[in-house]
Amino acid sequence: MHPVLSTSLTQALGCDYPVIQTAMGWVATSQLVIASVEAGVFGFLAAAVMDPAECEAEIQKIKSATSKPFGVNIHGFQPGVERIVDMCIDHEITALSYGRGPNPKIVSKVKNAGLKCVPTIGAGKHASRAVNMGADIVVCQGQEGGGHTGATPTWLLLTDVLDQNLGVPIVACGGFKDGRGLAAALAFGADGVAMGTRFMMSADSPTPDATKAEYIKSDVSNIPVSTKLDGLRQRMILNHTLDELEKSSRFGMLVRALKNSWKFKSQTDMSIIQTLKTAWDMASKTDLTIGQTLMAANAPMIIQRAMVEGKPEEGVLPSGQIAGLIYDLPDCAEIVSKIIAETETNLMRFSRTEV
């Protein structure tokens, strides 16, 4: 293996290659994490959409199938998050990842237990804040990334963060699928890359075949950013459902949100008071409004229609723009093997000397 592929990221996480499989809700299950870590990368379990019992069952499946290190992703405002954090510590998980609105107490607790803290940021100004709070690794997701994403292109965000000399491994995310991208990120100064869509579009992903087919048909120019799903910037493939959401009035969005809030309540056993309290807590600790946090009730139900139930036209398809340049569904082992071979080939081009 090319020596450049051994980076501060691989040393911190104990993985073979400087690649992270990101935590995609209802996609990064134990099935995908096992396949990705066995292929040599570092995988995150998407526990942010799980209750504590589901999370522990998934952790146990992973630990029974592989001895490779892996991480767990949480949302600071999800029900039962404290229990999930405790079980991650008890099971000696390697790392915990999180996004917006991290809880300083949770970060401190995780660090004191020896787990690595791996936040994802979408704006340069958030990088130093994350490190000051305790981040051991920072994932910089540019606007090309899928799902919730910022407004700064990947390479510009990476430039901003690298120039801050934060003293922790920096990971590039958004627009990566192959060895050319990994080689470019390493040459640029990053310590590795994080990929979600590429691993979702794999034979090992639990995403239904009918939904994967829609990703294969996608085009980079038809994967826009919308705020209509939950009030936040989210990149998704433009389909019938997203088109309807874009055309909805505020009243129509409110009606849809209330219906989905009720369905979400029945799934999570949260009372109306608990739902409102969660929305208030999230709004008070982030730059979101109460209305935006309540709109987030749209997301779980609509996303699951496509990503779990296999009805892509009735749901939405969170996606990085890179989906428009992916045309196959190999397994994780083949994906990683090809990425590393391509990376080494590209790195060798820079090490040749002309006589």
Image (tube, rainbow, N blue to C red):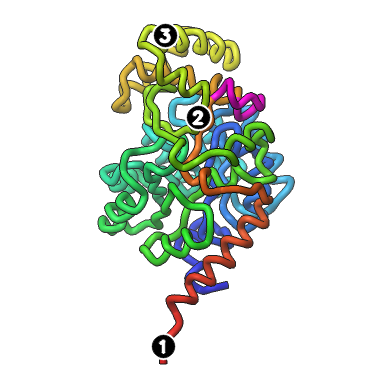
Instruction: Classify 88 as above or below 66.
Output: above
Magenta stretch, residue numbers:
306-315
Q: Amino acid at mark 1?
A: Glu
Q: Is 23 colored magenta in this rendering? A: no
Q: Is 310 colored magenta in this rendering? A: yes
Q: Nearer the viewer, mark 1 or mark 2?
A: 1
Image marks 3 and 1: residues in contact by CB distance under 8 Å: no
Q: How many numbered discs sit on the rendered protein? A: 3
Circle 1 SS class: loop
Instruction: Report if residue 102 is visible in the image.
Output: no
Q: CA distance from mark 2 to mark 3?
A: 35 Å
Q: CA distance from mark 1 to mark 2?
A: 58 Å
Q: As drawn, which residue projects farthest toward the bottom?
A: 355
The answer to which of marks 3 and 1 sits earlier in the sequence is 3
User: If the image is split into quadrants, where does the N terminus sit?
Assistant: bottom right
Q: Amino acid at mark 2?
A: Glu
Q: Is residue 53 left or right of residue 80?
A: right
Q: Residue at x 63, y 37 (%)?
A: 212
Q: Position of residue 36 (x, y in %)?
A: 63, 50
The answer to which of marks 2 and 3 sits earlier in the sequence is 2
Label 2: which residue? Answer: 82
Q: State the residue in front, 134 or 149.
A: 149
Instruction: Classify 310 as above or below 72.
Output: above
Q: State the residue in front, 89 or 230.
A: 230
Label 3: which residue? Answer: 252
Q: Residues within 10 Å of mark 3 (few under 14, many from 20)?
A: few
Label 1: which residue? Answer: 354
